[in-house]
């Protein structure tokens, strides 16, 4: 059985990974003007969204089926949702620049 700290760690880790990779792509493009970063940001948006959505649904389902882990699963899932406005802002910035 997964403990509470592991569940929260999953959400935080995926949040920070997506956030850091998004920053690398955005600021890498802004600083160097290399299309590699813009293309990487596009793929990050597609694949990162898919991975985060899968993790979000998995955490929700885990919490529903393991009621004693429900609160921690929901907290972890909500942490992942913080990426949505950040990704939207970065997408808007990226499309405005290119």
Image (cartoon, rainbow, N blue to C red):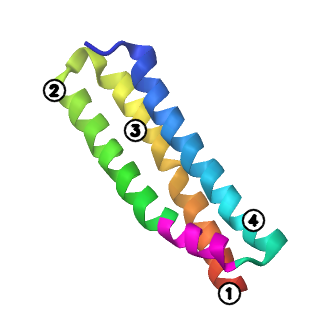
Q: Quadrant of residue 24?
A: bottom right
Q: Name the quadrant of the C terminus.
A: bottom right
**Earlier-in-chain disc, 2 versus 3:** 2
Where does the image place residue 71, in percent across and percent down from the top left? 36, 23
Q: Closer to the camera, 55 or 82?
A: 55
Callouts 2 and 3 close, C-beta under 8 Å: no
User: In the shown orientation, is residue 86 left or right of residue 70?
Assistant: right
Identify the residue at image location x=46%, y=25%.
Answer: 8
Q: Is residue 13 above or below residue 46?
A: above
Q: Residues within 10 Å of mark 3 (few under 14, many from 20)?
A: many
Instruction: Work out which quarter of the rendered image holds the N terminus and state it.
Output: top left
Per the model, the C-alpha gap separating discs 1 and 2 is 45 Å
Choose the circle earlier in sequence order: 1 or 2. 2
Q: Is residue 66 magenta?
A: no
Dot placed on the residue nearer the N-terminal end, 4 or 1: 4
Q: Could you tell me which secondary element the residue under label 3 belongs to?
A: helix
Distance between mark 4 and mark 2 Cα atoms? 42 Å
User: Do labels 4 and 1 touch, CB within 8 Å?
Assistant: no
78 left or right of 21 in image: left
Secondary structure beneath disc 2? helix
For mark 2, what is the residue? 65
Q: Which residue is mark 1?
A: 98
Instruction: Identify the mark nearer the N-term, 3 or 1.
Output: 3
Total tally of numbered discs in the picture: 4
Highlighted magenta segment, given as a residue range: 35-43
Residue where numbered disc 4 is placed: 28
């Amino acid at each position: 059985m997964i403990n509470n700290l592991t569940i929260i760690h999953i959400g935080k880790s995926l949040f920070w990974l997506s956030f850091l990779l998004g920053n690398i792509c955005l600021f890498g493009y802004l600083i160097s003007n290399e299309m590699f970063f813009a293309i990487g940001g596009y793929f990050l948006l597609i694949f990162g969204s898919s991975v985060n959505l899968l993790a979000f649904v998995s955490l929700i389902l885990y919490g529903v089926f393991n009621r004693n882990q429900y609160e921690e699963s929901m907290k972890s899932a909500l942490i992942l949702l913080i990426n949505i406005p950040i990704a939207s802002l970065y997408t808007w910035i990226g499309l405005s620049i290119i």
